Amino acid sequence: MTLALIAGRGSLPARVAAAQAEPPLVCVYEGCAPEGLKADLTFRLETLGSLLAHLQAAGIDQVCLCGAIDRPDLDPAQLDSRTAPLVPQFQQALAAGDNSALEVIKTIFEEHGLTVIGADALVPGLVVTEGVLSATQPDDQMRRDAARGAAVLAGLAALDIGQGCVIGGEQVYGVETIGGTDHLLASLPERVRGARAVLCKGPKTGQLREIDLPTIGPDTLQAAHQAGLAGVVVAAEGVIVLEQERCAALADEFELVLWVRGDDA
């Protein structure tokens, strides 16, 4: 065994584990258990140093960070002796934007001799290519809204926040922040229902692809439908779509557009 999964919530960790010829070591962040996958061990931010030492002793040389983990708080009272030297780096990460924080975490793993590898490199076909996955096709207004969404996401990249926004009639109804896509869709104004709005998801400029590729799945389609949206638009080659066939079937059931948009669309 040379691969460890640093696993969080959702179905992605189980998907990555199932695709490996040899079962990886599954390391689950406390309180963020993945679906359908048993933890070999659990850890907290305050015990990360001990986890790194354990991985080194076990002969692990690659780690894949997959699944959702909320930005943690650091409790000094819970720090163990191996983790205490990492506190200055933790403080830098916790004060930074999403991408910058993950850069710090990636550096910590690399400084301990571990190569960080993306889920998409371990599971072929996770990242979707250009095309419309639903029976319903994007109309001209949706194409304009998707272009507007791409421009909004490009503008947000400099602020290092979010990977998604909701656009309708070329107006911005919401942008993704710390609460993630679920919070964005649950907090949209009621008037979005009459706007034939779309959720747009895509990587930031300089996205740390090994750790934080944007991801959607069946739950995203359910939430988009419940929010009254007309479609979900994701950037080709830059977004993981979990359970693609199920997502396409849900899009058709809800009469949503599910569009993987290329740069020149």
Image (cartoon, grey):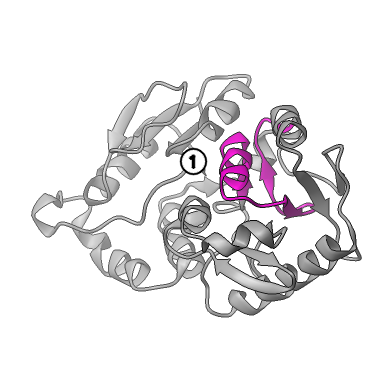
Task: Tell me which corner region of the image, top left, top right, bottom left or bottom right, holds residue 71.
Answer: bottom left
User: Badge 1, how many Cα within 10 Å: few under 14, some, many 20+?
Assistant: many
- The answer to whether any part of residue 164 appears in the image is no
Measuring from the top left, give residue 165's x and y in whole percent.
61, 64
Query: In the figure, is residue 39 to the left or right of 245?
Result: left
Report the label total: 1
Is the residue 127 above or below the residue 179 in the image? above
Q: Position of residue 215 (x, y in %)?
A: 61, 47
Residue 161 colored in magenta in the image: no
Assess whether residue 221 is covered by the magenta stretch: yes
For mark 1, give the secondary structure: loop
Q: Is residue 192 visible?
A: yes
Residue drawn at the location 29% of the way across and 38% of the way down: 31
Residue 77 at x, y percent in the picture: 8, 54
Dot 1 corresponds to which residue? 67
Residue at point 27%, 50% (across, down)? 45
How far across and down, in percent of the image, does residue 130 sit? Answer: 86, 49
| Relative height, residue 117 to residue 34 (above, below) | below
The quadrant in which the C terminus is found is: bottom right
Residue at the extreme left: 77
Looking at the picture, tell me which residue is in the foreground, 169 or 103. Answer: 169
Three-letter code for the amino acid on which mark 1 is drawn: Gly
Name the quadrant containing residue 41: top left
Q: Left of 79 or right of it: where is 173?
A: right
Q: Quadrant of residue 72?
A: bottom left
Q: Residue at x 61, y 52 (%)?
A: 213
* Nearest to the observer: residue 68 or residue 107: 68
Residue drawn 21% across the image and 59% down it: 74
Which one is in front, 260 or 258? 258
Extent of the magenta region: 215-244
